[in-house]
C-alpha cells in the first residue's frame, strides 16, 4: 500500500478528530517530522491535511505519525462508489 509519489507531489489525507486550531498545529508538526514531507498544511474545518512530499512516502508512515499525536487518518473513499450520505 505504498504511496509512490513523485518529488514535490501533493495530496490530501482526511484526518479524524482534528477539530480546532491546536489540533491542526499538532498534526502539521507530526507530518512535517516524517522523512520525505517537505510541507504540511491542515484545515480543521474540512479535517484535511495537504501534504507536499520531496520523495515517495509509504502511506503507513503518515498514518503512524498522525496516530502518534492522537488522531486518525480516514480511509480513502472508494473511487467508483456512489455515496449519498452527504
Ligand atoms: Mo482542543 Mo483540538 O482539545 O482536538 S486541541 S479540540
Image (cartoon, rainbow, N blue to C red):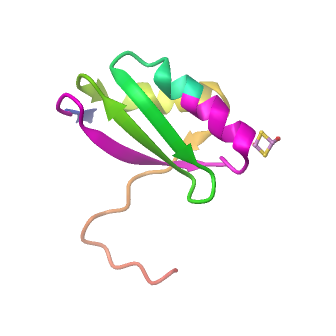
Is 26 left, or right, of 59 in this rendering?
right
Kindly give the residue lying farthest to the bottom in the view shown.
84
Reply above or below: 54 against 72. above
Query: How many marks do you count on the picture?
Result: 0
Q: Which residues are magenta?
A: 5-28
Location of residue 67 (image quadrant): top right
Front residue of 11 and 16: 11
Residue 15, position in %: x, y? 55, 47
Magenta stretch encompasses residue 25: yes
Residue 74 in percent (x, y) is at 50, 50
Residue 27 or residue 74, whichever sits in front = 27
Can the viewer see residue 65 in this picture?
Answer: no
- How far across and how far down the image is residue 16, in percent? 60, 49
Residue 49 located within the stretch drawn in magenta: no
Image quadrant in which the N terminus is located: top left
Residue shown at the point (67%, 48%) measured from the top left: 17
Residue 59 is left or right of residue 74, and the answer is left
Instruction: Please say whether residue 14 is visible from this viewpoint.
Output: yes
Q: Is residue 57 above or below residue 33?
A: below
| Residue 76 location, quadrant | bottom left
In the image, taking residue 19 as reference, residue 81 lies left or right, namely left
Kindly identify the residue that appears in the image at 38 percent across and 15 percent down: 35
> In this rendering, would 57 be left or right of 40?
left
**Rendered residue at 39%/47% (across/down):** 12
In the rendered image, which quarter is residue 42 located in? top right
Ligand 1, what quadrant? top right
Along the viewing direction, whichever of 70 and 34 lies nearer the viewer = 34
Residue 41 percent across, percent down from the top left: 49, 40
Q: Who's the residue at 19% across and 32% down the image?
A: 4
Amino acid at each position: 500500500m505504498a504511496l509512490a509519489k513523485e518529488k514535490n507531489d501533493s495530496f490530501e489525507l482526511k484526518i479524524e478528530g482534528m477539530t480546532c486550531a491546536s489540533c491542526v498545529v499538532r498534526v502539521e508538526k507530526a507530518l512535517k517530522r516524517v522523512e520525505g514531507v517537505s510541507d504540511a498544511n491542515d484545515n480543521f474545518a474540512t479535517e484535511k491535511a495537504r501534504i507536499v512530499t520531496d520523495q515517495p512516502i509509504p502511506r503507513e508512515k503518515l498514518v503512524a505519525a498522525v496516530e502518534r499525536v492522537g488522531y486518525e487518518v480516514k480511509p480513502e473513499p472508494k473511487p467508483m462508489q456512489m455515496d449519498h450520505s452527504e
